[in-house]
Image (cartoon, rainbow, N blue to C red):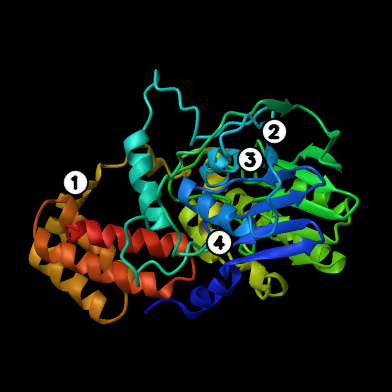
Amino acid sequence: MSAHPDLLEQNAQFVKQIHQLESNIYSAVGYAASNVHFLVGTEGIIVIDTTETTQAATNILADFRKISELPINTIIYTHSHRDHISGAIVFAEGRDVEIIASDNFTSDLIAVDTSRPAPNAVLGARTKRQFGIGLPQGELVSLGVGPSERPMQGLGAGYIEPSVRFSETIQITREGFELEFAKAPGETPDHQIVWLASKRILFCGDNFYHSFPNLYAIRGTPYRDFDAWADTMDQLMVYDAEILATGHTNPVVGATNVRQVLTDYRDAISYVVAETARGMNEGLDPVTIAANLRLPVELAQKPYLKEFYGHIGYASRAYFDGTLGWFDGNPTSLGQLPPKVEADKFIRLVGGKDKVMSSAQKALDEGEAQWAMELADRLIAADVELVAAHQVKITAMRILADQTVNAPTRNYYLHSARELEGN
């Protein structure tokens, strides 16, 4: 199996296991892209998040039934991403159960307004590429925050609409547990966290996981509120949790460890914002800012800030676009030539398609895979030397896939390569 060694090591976070966090609190990790949490009361069970497929939920529930046969009476959604809401029907087991969410529970993955034009086809295609859906065994090695080997039957099929929605911080009692719900925007604006004070366990959804946060998803997302996510880290630290039960990857245990990871997450997000803003104020373009952006050593060395899922450069470019828009400030960009027109002119300028093809192959041979791809793209845009140009691009993408520690990038390269190969 060929992949970045650090990305392969990240798979230790997804060993299939039901972790016992406390005497009656459990987290199912490694069964699917996201985790499922169980709070076992005297007469019933609370489930927090329900994963991405009905088959994954079925597998988790079957293993959990070895621990408790009590009925599941309440399901809580921490947020509306599909990988947290799609197994609810399995955990409900045909019963009318309570479904709790925040009052602004919504996302680009559910409740889509079909009456309005929307790029649903391209979003679907890009989602498959980011998550490597359809890649053969051996090529898909990790999701970055979830295992590569997971059941996909019933993807998105088990969602149940929330029956209770909260608009503010509130305390409720269910199954003998006194729970606090609070809005805590992060990866999505509709995030809510669940605090179990009696056990000092904080269920944080996707506000933290063992990777640099996914501030921008290459499947295609609107600008995520970086400042709100950083502020939420301060909000979570106030609880002084002993255990951080995460939406992905293993739980964080120990109050000191919990405070450290939340502090580092906040500081990493804030650093990307500050450095991107500094570059913007210096008149730099988003590509240059992103290419030169690195976390400080004291943050970069933290294993949970490696770019297994989120990517620092992509985050920086998203922040630029989210604050200043697509225009990079260069007046040339205001009338930028379409790719085919630019490619035709470029190829003529350098002396013809054969010279471009030769340069692309030379770049590939010398290990400059990115430059080889950019040259190949000009031939593809100009609709010349397509077979050879496609092969250069395929080879370059496979080289870059094995070099990156970022799972979505790796999966996107490999999926795109297979598409060019006709697979």
Residue neighbourhood size for the residue with mark 2, other residues' Cα within 10 Å, grouped as few (<14), some (14–19), many (≥20): many
Query: Which sits earlier in the primary sequence, circle 4 or circle 2?
Result: 2
Which one is nearer the viewer's eye here, 388 or 105? 105
Report x, y in % for residue 249.
62, 63
Q: Is residue 260 left or right of residue 353?
A: right
Q: Is residue 42 left or right of residue 348?
A: right
Front: mark 3 or 1: 3
Say which residue label 1 marks.
340
- Rounded to the nearest angstrom, the CA distance separating label 3 from label 1 is 42 Å
- Under circle 3, the secondary element is loop
Q: Is residue 12 left or right of residue 119?
A: right
Front: mark 4 or 1: 4
Q: How many marks?
A: 4
Report x, y in % for residue 237.
84, 54
Front: mark 4 or 2: 2
The disc labelled 2 sits on which kind of residue? Ile
Using the image, determine if residue 373 lies above or below residue 180.
Answer: below
Query: Which sits earlier in the primary sequence, circle 3 or circle 2?
Result: 3
Which one is nearer the viewer's eye here, 58 or 404? 58
Say which residue label 4 marks.
145
Quadrant for the N terminus, please.
bottom left
